[in-house]
Image (spheres, rainbow, N blue to C red):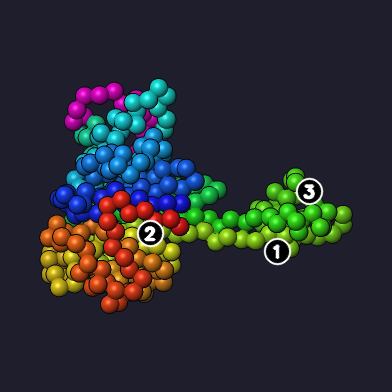
Amino acid sequence: MQLTFLGTGAMVPTKDRNVQGIYLDYEGEGILIDCGEGTQRQMSIAGINRLKIKKILITHWHGDHVAGLIGLIQTLGNTDEPGTVRLYGPEGTKHYLGHLLNSCSFDLRLDLEVKEVIPKSDTPLIFYENDRYALQAVNLKHTIPCLGYAFVEKDQRKVNMAKAKKLGLKEGPLIGRLQRGEAVLHEQKRITPSMVTTTRHGKKIAFVLDTEPCAGMHTIAREADLLIAEATYESSLDEKAEQYKHLTAQIVAQVAGQEGVKKLILTHFSQRYKTAEDIEADAKKIFPETTCAHDFLQVKL
């Protein structure tokens, strides 16, 4: 899988930073987390095919996170055979999207499935799942309803065919059962998955954008291989962060350390910062495995 940061600024775009948008490519499927203004152009610069987007996850409905949606939806429908895109967001998503679609004139040719995700507790809610991964959401605390998300890849079991052949197995239903973790009986001999398979543990990526400190950010970040989180300010501006319900670099770093995160990438920087060096240094005092994102940064997992 590969992540591309399409925007790393907060609220106001600058000459160096667009507003929020993160693209996750997983085995050729595109998942877009937020879609601030200019996201389509950023995708073009990054060489990303917009038509690969199959899911859009909206954290909340502030303009710097959604203002690029209307153009993107139009583009995704502007093909001979528009496909289906699933859009997820917090409570109120259908209301806001309805107004957005009525804000200009065009044919909605895209099959757009919209679902509001409303977790009932601080425990992450699985709102989508297939045989490869699950998507989770949790409530964060911002000035309006806001979600944190996690992409959780499932463990993958792989059959070592050389070992299997030594036991007399060939490609077929028994191999499929072993790959699913089931023991099989072959020539009156019981063969267990541990005898012929290895397991690759799936990766977890957590996204925490726009929130004040809250229980939800802890639970969604727990044991993540990668936590991507807003750090609008360095810790010397903690009063401003509290006023606008944002996070400082050190608060995020503390959460990463407490929740067993392996790597932390910070984003969503105030326009007051020409570079993110001070924010990164601030966080590294507590959590050394921290880096700050920049527009078009690509991360492979």
Residue 24 drawn at (x, y percent): 39, 49
57 is higher (above) or lower (below) than 238: above
Quarter containing the C terminus: bottom left
Q: Residue at x 29, y 74 (%)?
A: 284
Closest to the camera, between mark 2 and mark 3, is 3
Q: Badge 1 is on which residue? A: 194
Amino acid tagged 1: Ser
Q: Nearer the viewer, residue 185 or 167?
A: 167
- Reading the image, the residue beneath label 2 is 206
- Decide which of tag 2 and tag 1 comes sooner along the chain: 1
Say above or below: 193 vs 234. Answer: above
Task: Give how far across and how far down residue 257 sits, in percent.
Answer: 36, 74
Q: Secondary structure at mark 2?
A: strand
Instruction: Report the residue marked by disc 3.
Output: 170
What are the residue bounds of the magenta stretch?
102-120
Q: Is residue 211 visible?
A: yes
Q: Contact, CB < 8 Å: mark 2 with mark 3? A: no
Can you say whether 278 is above or below 110 in the image?
Answer: below
Q: Amino acid at mark 3?
A: Lys
